[in-house]
Image: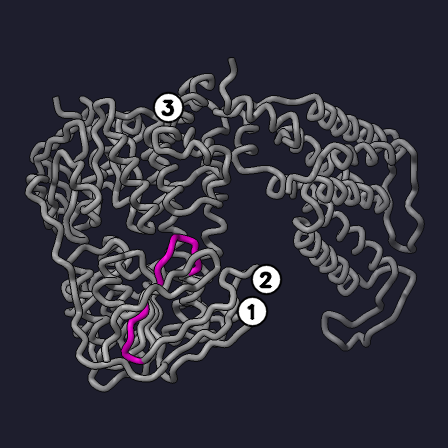
Amino acid sequence: MAIAHLDHFTYSYPGATGAALLDVSARIDSGLTVVTGASGSGKSTFLRVFNGLVPHFHGGRVSGTATVAGLDVLATPTRVLARNAGFVFQDPELQTVYATVDREVAFGLENAAIPQREIGARVNDALHEVGIEHLAGRAVRTLSGGERQRVALASALAVRPRLVVLDEPTSQLDPDGAELVLAAARRATGDGRAVIVSEHRLRRLMPAANSLLVVDRGRVTEADPAAWRPSTAMSAPRLRAPGGEAWGVSRATVGFGGVPVLESAELAGRAGEVVALAGPNGGGKTTLLRLIAGLAAPMSGTVTRPPGRIAYLPQNPVAVLHRPSVRQEVQFTIDRAGGQAGERPERILNMLGIAGLADRYPRDLSSGERQRAAIAAVLPGAPQLVLLDEPTRGMDLASRSALIAIVADLRDRGAAVVIATHDEDLQAALADRVVDVAHGKVTERAPHAMPA
Amino acid sequence: MPHPLHRRWRMRAETNHLNARAVAAWSAACLVIVLATTNPVYKTLVLAAALAALVAGAGFSRTRRLFIAAGLVAAFAVVLNFVSAHLGATVLFTLPEQLPAIGGPYTLEALAYGATGGVTVAAAILAAAPFSLLLASDEVMDALPAALSRTGAALASALNLVPAVGATFVQVSEAQRMRGWRPRGPRSWAEVAVPVVLTSVESSIQLAESMEARGFGSGPRTHMSPVRMSSRDWVLVVAAASAVALFVISIAAGWAGPWAPYPQLTAPPLDARPLLACVLLFTPALQWRSRT
């Protein structure tokens, strides 16, 4: 018997002209179901049906039926469905209620009015199931992103639901953190439970998948997980050799409140060269990027930058987005950069594949679309130095390919590029050099063959 | 056999754990006394008790910023009264009457009254500070009566978002600076303020969505942590209650009569009974150990 079932389910957000989900029929059995699809295709909306957030929390128009653990989703409030369908969201910071790990994991149990004498054991079991017993009692704010996501998964499992849904749980994690979360998700399929994971990094998940659902413009189709093949490697052939040194960090120590995050950092980059900063969450990549950008002052040492515009994409794309439309976001930067001759927003929007979103309010977009809108908003104006902090966060394969093409174009026009990224495919496609930033140190990896 | 997590809580209770209900009783006692009296000596004693309790509980380094902030607020109250109240017999100096707002005699009485107000404000701030400095949001929540537990959970989650607003402000202002924005007058800050507010609202909605998805609001809640009062907590509650009772009786009996600096400054009257009530407020300074 299916744990969850959708039958001709159609859903539109309030005020939307088109349907976000269109005539979806799907069956979820025990085991691992992987959900994939392009950014903005409707994956998150689809997943939110299983705990009733769609339509109960978001409102909107619905037709068709949906059942989870025998409960009619449309007739059952989310807070009741929560006992049968656990949910892990993308952003680990925006799902934390309590300050300590064990209290956080207990939150759902308290809401379900589980007797106090049982809560401790169930919290311990859930922490054990995702391999983080050692974190019990720790302050949540002291955890890495990967640890926080495993706390979120433990919180979902503690209620012992029949279905657990994870919505791109690794989009903000380093490779090690992502692997631990996905391993925990794979293990959670025990006891006849169904686990649904929406992911762009399919390589780690597909070998264990029992089912594969592909979401495309609101429609959901089933595919054979055994037939899935990893995508071919992306590449961006260089058109011209790098120039002279464009930026440099010399014996720089930088930190917060007098506490160093990076000490005696030594690094430089050339015009037309792409340097990738790799390393674990919290290792100091963003701090180094902010130092190069001039947003963080060195406690000692020096930083040099090229004359001209610096483009900076922060880790959180919504920090950039506040204009009424995507087009106006891009135009804003073009105007501030002095209106490069003939530069029009449409060029970069087309390159990123979001020309169709030009008149949309940026904050109404999906996370992957927001990321592309933010990239489009910061890159115009012929920057001489391009600093990108986790630019592929939440992006599908097509979007990543578009980003690679744009960065390669900037590189070939002579811009120096620095990218802080966990994305190993992006590093392989673009980076002339990869630099590890961890434990307060900046260490260059064995050099790639540099172009002449 | 008790569960390991319960054992850990008991250990916490036996070492340096503070019970939020006991802390609330002490804070309330401080507030009642400092607001009930006009006598600067008693007010100063309450302020000293709050200072001592915070230093004992949190250590000086963690409380330094709070002390500076409370001092600045108190100083503002002093200056405001000194500048605006040109009453009293002891004139220290006089500014020309023609000067708008600040012209007139400056008196010792106005300074004394302002100082009394400043001490009141500082004492009230420091008496409430243990809730943010010494207690975690879940400890405060657990102390709430069952009828308020949903409000408490919502409050705890809102408190967890406060640091995120500060971080968002930094992110947005940096991102805007890198796109060419420069602060030029109050209106230019809309470029930063609007995205910060929007992001904060979105964060709140996402948190609300997460809480809903975890069953919040589905009915009566239980609590993971047993809320137990230790003997130390009871000592604090009894001390706080005794302080309030003794001080209220002192006011009613005329032992803690009113004091006013106008028209001429006089020494405030003192009595051993209200003094004893204030001294009882020093109990946590003896009980609490630094949680740093």
Q: How many numbered markers are drawn? A: 3
**Amino acid identity at mark 3:** Ala
Specify whether disc 3 shares its chain with disc 2. yes
Dot 2 falls on which chain?
A: A
Quadrant of the image containing the C terminus of chain A: bottom left
Residue drawn at 37 percent across, 33 percent down: A131
Q: Which of the two discs, 3 and 1, labels the residue nearer the N terminus?
A: 3
Q: CA distance from mark 2 to mark 1?
A: 8 Å
* Callout 3 crowding tier (Cα within 10 Å): few <14, some 14–19, many ≥20: many
Q: Check residue A112 in the rendering and tell me which mark sits there, or answer none.
A: 3
| Residue A328 seen in the figure | no
Above or below residue A387? Residue B146 is above
Residues behind callouts 3 and 1 on a single chain: yes
Q: Which region of the structure is painted magenta?
A: A271-284
Query: Which residue is tagged 1?
Result: A299
**Where's residue A118, x and y in %?**
43, 18
Secondary element at tag 3: loop
Which residue type carries mark 2? Gly
Predominant SS along the magenta part: loop
Q: Are marks 2 and 1 in contact (CB under 8 Å)?
A: yes
Residue assigned mark 2: A258
Left or right: A413 as drawn, with respect to A28: right
Q: Residue furthest bottom?
A: A341
